């Protein structure tokens, strides 16, 4: 299965399991992955919490690529150290990197 086909399956997974819109925005997927990594389930989150959840997802997704390393939990929230700066990327390149990272995450976690 190529990346494009795998990506479609991931989008379908989110549509089926989280009732997201068709072709959900990457930020929605990052938020839901952050929730999964936090492990706290659905509840009311402040705007700051939502930003932190997306940050958790980005750190977790980019960890296998050597950009971040999980260090510990603080007040129930995973903490990461930045190991390497991300290269300067154009917006479409950022999206492609995150899509590759999400595909890797789904394969690693055996979610599909």
Image (spheres, rainbow, N blue to C red):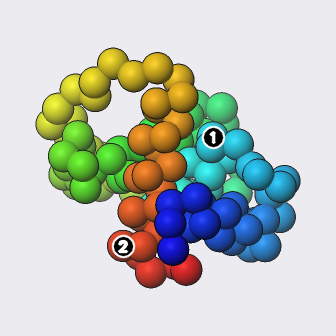
Q: Which of disc 1 and disc 2 is earlier in sequence?
A: 1
Q: With 78 as the anchor, is 94 left or right in this view?
A: right
Q: With 86 as the anchor, is 31 left or right in this view?
A: right
Q: With 20 as the anchor, is 74 left or right in this view?
A: left
Residue 108 at x, y = what percent?
36, 73
The residue positioned farthest toward the left in the image shown:
83
The residue sitting at 73% across, 68% down in the picture is 12
Q: CA distance from mark 2 to mark 1?
A: 20 Å
Relative to 87, say whether 29 is above or below. below
**Label 2 neighbour load within 10 Å: few <14, some 14-19, many 20+:** few
State if disc 1 and disc 2 touch (CB < 8 Å). no
Residue 84 at x, y = what percent?
17, 32
Q: Secondary structure at mark 1?
A: helix
Q: Secondary structure at mark 2?
A: helix
Of residues 43 and 70, which is closer to you in this image? 70
Q: Quadrant of the C terminus?
A: bottom right
Of residues 67 and 42, which is closer to you in this image? 67
Q: Is residue 36 visible?
A: no
The residue sitting at 43% across, 52% down in the picture is 100
Q: Which label was assigned to residue 14?
A: none
Total labels: the figure holds 2
The residue sitting at 46% across, 31% down in the picture is 94
Residue that label 2 marks: 108
Q: Which label was assigned to residue 27?
A: 1
The residue sitting at 50% across, 61% down in the picture is 3
Of residues 107 and 42, which is closer to you in this image? 107
Relative to 62, say whether 88 is above or below. above
Q: Is residue 92 visible?
A: yes
Q: With 66 as the anchor, is 15 left or right in this view?
A: right
Residue 77 at x, y = what percent?
40, 51
Residue 85 at x, y = what percent?
22, 26
Of residues 22 and 74, which is closer to you in this image? 22
């Amino acid at each position: 299965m190529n990346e494009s086909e795998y990506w479609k399956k991931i989008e379908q997974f989110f549509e089926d399991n989280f009732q997201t819109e068709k072709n959900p925005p990457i930020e929605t997927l990052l938020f839901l992955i952050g929730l999964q990594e936090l492990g706290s389930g659905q509840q009311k989150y402040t705007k700051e919490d939502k930003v932190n959840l997306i940050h958790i997802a980005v750190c977790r997704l980019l960890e296998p690529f050597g950009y971040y390393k999980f260090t510990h939990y603080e007040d129930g929230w995973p903490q990461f150290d930045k190991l390497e700066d991300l290269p300067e990327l154009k917006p479409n390149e950022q999206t492609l990197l995150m899509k590759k990272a999400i595909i890797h995450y789904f394969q690693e976690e055996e979610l599909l």
